[in-house]
Amino acid sequence: MADKTRVAVVGGGAAGFFAAIACAEKLGPAGEVTLFEATAHPLAKVRVSGGGRCNVTHACFEPRELVKAYPRGGRELLGAFHRWQPRDTVEWFAARGVETKTEADGRMFPVTDDSATIVDCLTRAAESAGVTVRTSLGVRKAERLGRAGAAPDFWLTLTDASTQRCDRLLLATGGNKSSAGLVIAQALGHAIEPPVPSLFTFHIDDARLIGLSGVSVENVAASVPGTKLRTDGPLLITHWGLSGPAILKLSAWGARELAACHYEFKLAVNFTPGHTRESLAKEFAAVRTAQAKKQLATWNPLGLPQRFWERMLATAGIAPAVQWAGVAGAALGALAAQLTGAEFTVVGKSMNKEEFVTCGGVRLREVEFQTMESKLCPGLHFAGEILDLDGITGGYNFQAAWTTGWLAGQAMATPGTR
């Protein structure tokens, strides 16, 4: 009787679990799949993501459009998404009793609005497939051994000092600087792009924002003067500065540039995208004629949040109780300038706790994306954020985890893929 194929998965997050399940389901009794999670809490990030609702994926079912949401890795993921994309993810969870819903912005959540639904589904699927999940036990070291007349295998040194052999090894430990997977990958010959934060909020100390925490603007255009960094989307004012999808997207696309300037830079915000200072000033002039007797505080032609609108009036030196007819053209010009080209000084960052994401990790050119196998070390595979790929906010990072995990799991269970 032939020996069973022994597969070790290092990392109990979304990518690791999905890979382990895919591999174990395909191997069946012919294999043994063991998942090692260094902490006592596997799938911890899944549990807290999306404010505890879990943004499973994004309702974008055209791979060429989908890859546009990845500042790093989009080119490599194109082929991968043709093999496993959001539609496949939705169908996979539905087949296991988890229905999803799509929100207006394209984000997809379980209909329960509870991340525990996803965690429980993955846990049950792993158990049903025969995956052995070992928590509070990580992998400290992996050595690849080649024996005459036999396929190479790996000897793992675990964090409790015990050892274990496996035929195939998957690293899915995430991409932060303390990732054990990155240390192992480097020891096995891989180059590592230095990890830096992605998806973070901006620290701004500015009188225009004081007291407005919690106010959101439906759509803005944000940019970093002197660079090509430009995004749009909703913006949220916080106690420490600015956040929201527009800021998170900007941080993702500019992860390396903003790290290089130590998170100290100028931020330009147009709160009325589609308008320039001149076009908005003309619109205000038209409102002054048509609504002459209305007070500026009570007649906001732009639909901006009331507290924010009043703060912008004050910034432009306009009393909120004044009537439109009584505002000088210069004051309206100042208001238009403030709304279309406000400039803020960013003095630092905070990680978006719901979506801790880094850019950096194993270099993509060293990985075969059909199988997620190392080009340098046969039998070694990667999945998720340990790779130098990351997406913007909105379920894209989980989709990359599902896709790379599924591809790796399938490949590890397929004879002759090494």
Image: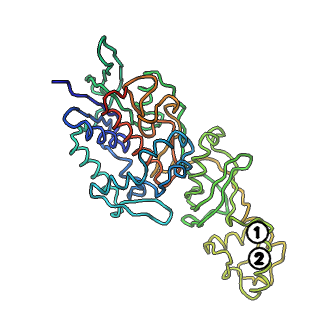
Q: Quadrant of residue 314?
A: bottom right
The answer to whether 373 is drawn above or below residue 355 in the figure is above
Question: Mark 1: which secondary structure?
Answer: helix
Q: Amino acid at mark 1?
A: Ala
The amino acid type of the residue labelled 2 equals: Phe
Question: Is residue 12 shown above or below 119?
Answer: above
Asked whether disc 2 touches disc 1, contact meaning CB atoms under 8 Å apart, the reply is: yes
Residue labelled with disc 1: 336
Q: Position of residue 260 (x, y in %)?
A: 64, 37
Q: Residue furthest left?
A: 1
**Residue 350 shows in the view:** no
Q: How many marks?
A: 2
Picture quarter containing residue 308?
bottom right
Task: Please name whichever residue, 112 or 176, is drawn nearer the observer in this view of the structure.
Answer: 112
Q: Is residue 15 above or below residue 321?
A: above
Q: Which residue is mark 2?
A: 284
Label 2: how many Cα within 10 Å (few below 14, some 14–19, many 20+): many
State the residue at coordinates (39%, 23%). 378
